[in-house]
Image: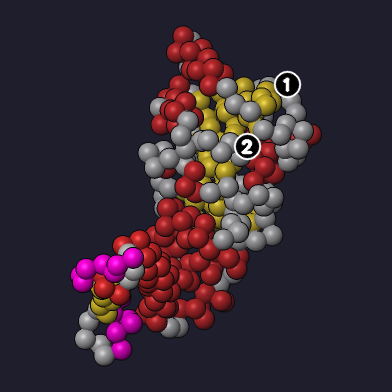
Amino acid sequence: MSKLRAKTITYHCAKKYDETGTGCVSKRFKGSDFQNEEEMLNAIRLFKEDMKLKNKEYRMSQVIEEAPNESIIIEEMIPDFKNDINLKLNKGTGNTTALIASSQQGKSYMMTKIYQKYYSSGKWITTLYTQSPQSFGGINSVKSSNLIIFPGFDNKVILCERLINRGTDNKYNFCNMFDDQINIRDNKIINDSILTFRNSNMSTVLCIQYSNLLSKMSRANYNNILLGKLNTDEAIEVAIKTFLRQALKNIGINSLADQINFYKKNIKDYGFIHYIPSEDTISFVRL
């Protein structure tokens, strides 16, 4: 098989890898060096993947270098964890709360405590949607006459609640709780519950494992975000960039590297960061 005609494709990577300090490093791929185009494209792909990883490591190191003494301060910071949850809720409308943490890190238990404190009284009609009704954390403690436990999820339940309140001038207080429903981001009815149905006196509490399961449109409509232990640095980074970046800076944790380390160090043993978007503030709770 003949080699490719001589041609050069140039890619650039971060100047960190240019030891002369003159600018970006150039990596040239000559067509004549490869047996065919597929071989050359594969070499380019591997190079780009390697540079992506190295550049990310470089950016992280630069953040740390910008604040060499901050890491020492972060190690000495010990959050004041409360043993009770106090949600920020608006009156006269529905409210939304999201609990985000990896599996087996206390989300369901925290949801039961939220239900008991805010939605278990006789004035609320609450539906819990869960794929595993019998294994839901704390299920025995949340059973009551005004709690409906629904296996899986059915859009018609929520639509019926909205229809009832539209016909009764928002007479009833509805709350819908979702336990690890993985299709939340793409479900129109769930997103409508967060974006507009709250005006029909319908509140929502969600348990999910990743921040990016929340649709971008709905993220600004949450009254409360509770973030627990996440098993990967990538998941922690997404949670910080999505919700906590400025709030952590407000308490003196400025670099992304230190924010990730602070999160990993302190949000364990079923601890949660309670973020209130409307105030851009955080507090800490461990039940």
Query: Marks 2/1: CA distance?
Result: 19 Å
Judge whether residue 3 is colored magenta.
Answer: yes
Q: Return the residue nearer the eye: 139 or 283.
A: 139
Quickly name the residue at label 1.
145
Q: Amino acid at mark 1?
A: Ser
The image quadrant that residue 87 belongs to is top right
Q: Residue 131, image x and y in percent?
A: 67, 33
Residue 115 versus residue 46: which sits nearer the camera? 46
User: As displayed, is residue 125 above or below residue 235?
Assistant: above
Residue 18 placement: quadrant: bottom left
Q: Position of residue 16 (x, y in %)?
A: 32, 81
Residue range of the region highlighted in magenta in the rendering: 1-19
Residue at the spot 21% in from the left edge and 86% down from the top edge: 22
Seen in the picture, residue 116 relative to 61 is either above or below; the reply is: above
Residue 179 shows in this picture:
yes
Does 157 sit above or below residue 245?
Answer: above
Q: Is residue 14 magenta?
A: yes
Q: How many marks?
A: 2
Instruction: Provide residue 104's location: percent of width, then percent of height.
Output: 69, 50
* Residue name at image x 50 percent, y 60 percent: 234
The residue indicated by pointer 2 is: 179
Q: Residue most toward the right?
A: 140
